[in-house]
């Protein structure tokens, strides 16, 4: 059995129905808004995806462009490398050719030097043979000279035996020959002579004594001349020792330059050269007078 509804109940039912309708409409609107937002967000994501796709495509085109450019650069670099390699190979071949040419030239020069050296060796060998021949001839000549000197010495000894006690007078004769020549001889060698004395003697305590055969004096120097009829090497050695003691025996000449000279009519072989090596002037006979055997540039020793 149906129940009769009042107006108020109908009105309340209407209001509830209207409220539900309104609620449903709001929910439908909210759903529409959500759907619109979802659609909008989807469209935005689609636009963004499309933008990213376009950007990716742009990057791909740019990457492809860079790849093509890199490939072009690699081709260009490969071409330059081949060209440089060709140039370097050409320079290397040229240097090798130049070096080969220089090597051949050096080998030719070396061969020429070897030939020249061989020629010099051959010439030197001939010169040595010639020198050996000359030495042999000179040796024979020296032996002959020595024989003659020995013969002369023998003759002098025989003469000495014959004259006997006249030896001292012979020495005086030699001194007399040398003394007058001293002034001219030493003046020519830059030693002006102020005084020439013979037989200068001095004594010292203990029996020591010294005798100078000829003493040549000037302002700055004195020359002691030892005179022998026959001059031997031991005479020169003894005389050098005498020169070293001269100032002790003759202090009045201590401030002067002391020079030495030896004179002999006859000399043992090479004694003149030995005396010169000791720094002494050497006076030798020449015809009827005497001369200095020393060369012009001779520098005497000072004591």
Image: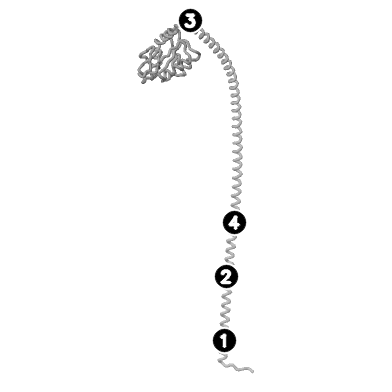
Q: Disc 3 and disc 1: Cα gap in Å?
A: 195 Å
Q: Kindly indicate whether the residue at mark 1 contacts the one at mark 4 (C-beta within 8 angstroms).
A: no
Identify the residue at horizontal 59%, vertical 93% (top origin).
5
Q: Position of residue 175 (x, y in %)?
A: 41, 10
What residue did someone put label 3 on? Answer: 162
Which secondary structure, mark 2? Answer: helix
Q: Disc 3 and disc 2: Cα gap in Å?
A: 163 Å
Q: Kindly indicate whether the residue at mark 2 contacts the one at mark 3 (C-beta within 8 angstroms).
A: no
Q: Any mark on residue 16, and which?
A: 1
Residue with the most extreme top position: 162
Mark 3 or mark 2: whose residue is earlier in sequence: 2
Q: Position of residue 32 (x, y in %)?
A: 58, 76
Q: Any mark on residue 141, and which?
A: none
Which secondary structure, mark 1? Answer: helix
Residue with the most extreme right position: 1
Q: Kindly indicate whether the residue at mark 1 contacts the one at mark 2 (C-beta within 8 angstroms).
A: no
Identify the residue at horizontal 48%, vertical 14% (top origin).
232
What residue did someone put label 4 on? Answer: 63
| Image side of residue 48 versus residue 240, left or right | right
Which secondary structure, mark 3? Answer: helix
50 above or below 279? below
Q: Kindly indicate whether the residue at mark 4 contacts the one at mark 3 (C-beta within 8 angstroms).
A: no
Q: Disc 4 and disc 1: Cα gap in Å?
A: 67 Å
Q: Position of residue 20 (x, y in %)?
A: 57, 84
Q: Closer to the observer: label 3 or label 1?
A: 3
Mark 4 or mark 1: whose residue is earlier in sequence: 1
Mark 3 or mark 1: whose residue is earlier in sequence: 1
Asked if residue 297 shows in the view, the reply is no
Q: Nearer the viewer, residue 140 or 163?
A: 163
What residue did someone put label 2 on? Answer: 41
In which quadrant of the rendered image does the C terminus lie? top left
């Amino acid at each position: 059995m149906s129940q009769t509804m009042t107006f108020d109940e109908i009105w309340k039912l209407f209001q509830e129905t209207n409220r539900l309708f309104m609620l449903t409409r709001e929910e439908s609107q909210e759903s529409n808004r959500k759907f619109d937002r979802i659609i909008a967000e989807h469209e935005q994501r689609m636009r963004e995806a499309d933008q990213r796709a376009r950007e990716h495509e742009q990057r791909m085109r740019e990457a492809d462009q860079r790849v093509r450019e890199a490939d072009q650069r690699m081709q260009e670099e490969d071409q330059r490398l081949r060209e440089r390699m060709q140039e370097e190979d050409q320079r290397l071949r040229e240097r090798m050719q130049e070096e080969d040419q220089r090597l051949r030239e050096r080998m030719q020069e070396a061969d020429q030097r070897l030939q020249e050296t061989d020629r010099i060796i051959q010439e030197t060998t001939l010169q040595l043979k010639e020198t050996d021949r000359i030495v042999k001839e000179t040796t024979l000549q020296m032996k002959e000279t020595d024989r003659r000197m020995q013969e002369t010495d023998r003759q002098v000894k025989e003469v000495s035996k014959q004259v006997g006690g006249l030896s001292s007078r012979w020495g005086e004769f030699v001194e007399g020959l040398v003394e007058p020549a001293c002034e001219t001889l030493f003046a020519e060698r830059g030693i002006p002579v102020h005084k020439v004395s013979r037989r200068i003697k001095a004594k010292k305590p203990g029996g020591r004594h010294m005798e100078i055969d000829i003493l040549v004096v000037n302002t700055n120097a004195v020359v002691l001349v030892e005179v022998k009829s026959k001059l031997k090497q031991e005479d020169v050695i003894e005389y050098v020792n005498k020169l070293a003691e001269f100032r002790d025996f003759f202090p009045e000449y201590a401030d002067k330059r002391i020079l030495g000279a030896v004179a002999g009519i006859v000399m043992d072989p090479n004694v003149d050269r030995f005396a010169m090596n000791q720094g002494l002037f050497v006076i030798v006979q020449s015809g009827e007078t005497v001369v200095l055997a020393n060369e012009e540039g001779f520098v005497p020793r000072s004591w």
